[in-house]
Image: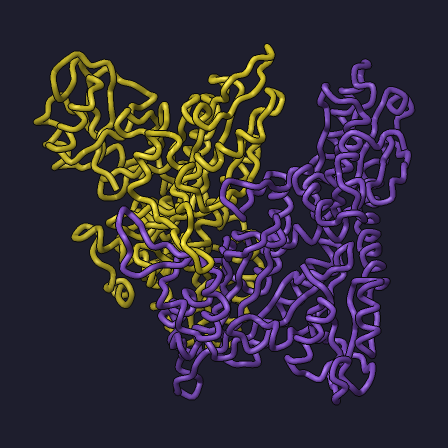
Chain colours: A yellow, B purple
Amino acid sequence: MGKENGFVEEITNIDENFAQWYTDIVLKAELADYTDTKGCVAIRPYGYAIWENIQKYADAEFKKTGVKNVSFPMLIPESLLQKEKDHVEGFAPEVAWVTEAGGQELDEKLCIRPTSETIISTMYSKWLNSWRDLPFVYNQWCSVLRWEKETRPFLRSREFLWQEGHTIHETAKEAKERTIQMLNIYADLIENVLAMPVLKGQKTESEKFSGADFTYTVESLMHDGRALQSGTSHYFGQRFSKPFNIKFQNREGKEEYAYQTSWGISTRLIGAIIMAHGDNRGLKLPPKIAPIQAVIVPVAAHKEGVLEAANALFEKLNGNFRMKLDDRDQYSPGYKFNDWEMRGVPVRIELGPRDIENNKCVVVRRDTSEKIEVSLDEIQEKLATILEDIQTNMFNMCKENVERRTTIAKTMEEFKHNLEVNQGYVKAMWCGSAECEDKIREETGAKSRCIPFEQEHLSDVCVCCGKPAGKMVFWGRQY
Amino acid sequence: MGKENGFVEEITNIDENFAQWYTDIVLKAELADYTDTKGCVAIRPYGYAIWENIQKYADAEFKKTGVKNVSFPMLIPESLLQKEKDHVEGFAPEVAWVTEAGGQELDEKLCIRPTSETIISTMYSKWLNSWRDLPFVYNQWCSVLRWEKETRPFLRSREFLWQEGHTIHETAKEAKERTIQMLNIYADLIENVLAMPVLKGQKTESEKFSGADFTYTVESLMHDGRALQSGTSHYFGQRFSKPFNIKFQNREGKEEYAYQTSWGISTRLIGAIIMAHGDNRGLKLPPKIAPIQAVIVPVAAHKEGVLEAANALFEKLNGNFRMKLDDRDQYSPGYKFNDWEMRGVPVRIELGPRDIENNKCVVVRRDTSEKIEVSLDEIQEKLATILEDIQTNMFNMCKENVERRTTIAKTMEEFKHNLEVNQGYVKAMWCGSAECEDKIREETGAKSRCIPFEQEHLSDVCVCCGKPAGKMVFWGRQY
């Protein structure tokens, strides 16, 4: 295909070097860039606009369930971080410490929040009196910092943007229901907006959040068959409420410690979108999240009436769709076609003199490359239908990848073989021991993704040790 | 007034101790609270909802002018901060330093951004090539940290939320126009949404932003007559673009350094709202920014049909207005009246059995305490009108305060006298020297607020030194 030159040949082949392909997309589609602050990226307008669309959707869904937004300090005194034993063990090694400020050494050093359970718990303790005050269902959109050794834009950045919801409840039952409710919002966002099928389940003891009773997760599978933890929802029981003294007078007039949850999604999701949908032509964005849903590229723009018609079409569609008119005069239409394909815009609309004569335009789908002639009188309705169809098709393409890469293993031989051939998810029975998890990871590179809510009975015994096994687990190598 | 007990008597009298009154409002209206991180507050749901309304309005206005949102790292390497001489002198003394991270001492310490000119300038240098790329008109909503010695919630917090816009342009003219454009958006927000008149002008050399060529400001006046800098817009010329090497090939094919601006508003505005509008009954929120515009308080809620009618009224109005139904059964209506007045809700709707019988409700205005009987058939339209009227009246009340407290001084005697009697703004001629500014501050406690765009010729000589003076300046004590 003659037009696939220019930008496109600069992108590494997706099947030859997926990691480099990913970096190429991040930089060339201008989603993010490396900065002088090692391990931290700048998110550029096009990347940030994706995040804003995620925020807009998620925030509205949160609020429908009674979530209220708040803001807590980014700095946490060392003594606070240390109050919950498992939590500090999990997070202390990877925090950044402020030791000097305002020209002086601090008496007590302050960490930049890696997550905010501790500082929020102290405030909940202060604010809570009676069961009548409950629940607190608060969330903050902010950034957190974790001093990772190896970083990659969006996937594992030292600083990343996220939302962290923190709730306390009168009963364990209500708190547990909230963890599921939020997990379902995440699953819905990822499936219906980001067009990626998710796997829902519970993390094993080894993989749960530091300080949680249990952790629910939604996992997605990338183009290369590796898994990505895309959102988590934690139930703490009273693990924080006891050391942090979050108690209330219950309906019987007695003191009781509150039941707590937290849940989060982050800019990792942008990494997931790139890696689940992209191809050799570049980024491919689901219409519901794309900052630009359709770009109009005038053809032979120097000819009389073309730019005017392109402008008129833009005005007609903008508002109903997120539109862009590419009227740059220093680039050829061919260059622009490649450029917008690389940037993942779901639909390109070509409009030239002959189209205008015939009162039509040419709509080109990013997902299938299909070219569709559409009358200018019908473009409004047709574009809506085409975008919906792209959204559905992208989900289905992703789903096919997941199904193709999901296998069953009843022996370790099968397990290793499947991963070598397929990457992807391996379903296998598990006895429940951390030893078997460790051994599987050492031998295959795969971690447990989760104990899925939808269980299947594959056999009676653990794939690793052969002892009785009650649970089926999804396993996979991960990002 | 018998019902004014309960909450109300706990609030310090506004005219006896304004500072304590302010703190009482912040805590009792549950806008924010002190945390274990000294000098940093937690913004509670009710306070954060005000910020969200400010964000929503400002962000939409920004975007209409082509602003795009982005995210830059919160940590800035020391070497970067030091690249612009005046800038580092202004900010270095009040930054917080990260010196350890991931279990190790850092080779180069990193400051938590006090503002982001430096880190953003390095990226602009990387991204800019040609005049065709310009302008960059980017903004981020984030928090920044400045290690203030004395802090007060919202007004002067070590960490505060803000937006910082950073732009680069092809010409000085375009950049200067952008600073005015953004200042006008701030003025419009503060006057038309927050219902406070603003004073627009240019900061003197002593009061401008560290590193700027000049700074424009919008100033507001608080209930007690002190001024508050409410938003600023800076023109940098090439002061950053030269040390940071932000250059482009211009239309003549030559290299040129870009022309730069930055501009910001912060959660200080919440402090301004409290202090400009509040009274002895508590907070008073302009309808356009109030998280709850009208609260329905059922009277004799135990009687048959009352709660149902209150619920029906809520359902009817919610969606068109930001509504709250207070159906708490542990409080009396009188307690609720005080409670919602203290929280500044613009309108209270009382609904009791006799109202229901007569197909009406009683609307009580927070600003005037006026009680208005409204037919339930007309409540939709009447409520809209009443809220608009409250918005206008609150602006006018504020404006009267500013006018009453704005005086002219032609001598230092008058200057001191006016401030003693009135606080407020003193208008006086100024010779332009920093010495006179210093002397005026020492003798009166007032700083220059700004050189207003609307100049008046009060006399030919400086109020302080008696030398020729070409500029009229607004002066005032400040927050």
Q: Position of residue B285 (x, y in %)?
A: 74, 46
Between A295 and A153, the one lying in front of the other is A153
- Residue A376 higher or lower than A115, as above or below: below
Residue A125 in the figure: left or right of residue A228: right
Residue A100 in the figure: left or right of residue B434: left
Q: Position of residue B372 (x, y in %)?
A: 90, 37
In which image quadrant can residue A282 be found?
bottom left
Between B190 and B353, the one lying in front of the other is B190
Quarter of the image with the C terminus of chain B in it? bottom right
What is the number of callouts on the image?
Answer: 0
- Residue A195 higher or lower than A475, as above or below: below
Can residue A22 be seen in the rendering of this structure?
yes
Q: Position of residue B246 (x, y in %)?
A: 40, 76
Can residue A45 be seen in the rendering of this structure?
no
Between A405 and B66, the one lying in front of the other is B66
Between A285 and A174, the one lying in front of the other is A174
Question: In this view, which residue lies farthest toward the left?
Answer: A413
Q: Residue at x 79, y 19 (%)?
A: B301
Q: Residue at x 73, y 66 (%)?
A: B476
Q: Residue at x 32, y 40 (%)?
A: A92
Quarter of the image with the N terminus of chain B in it? top right
Q: Position of residue A104 (x, y in %)?
A: 43, 57
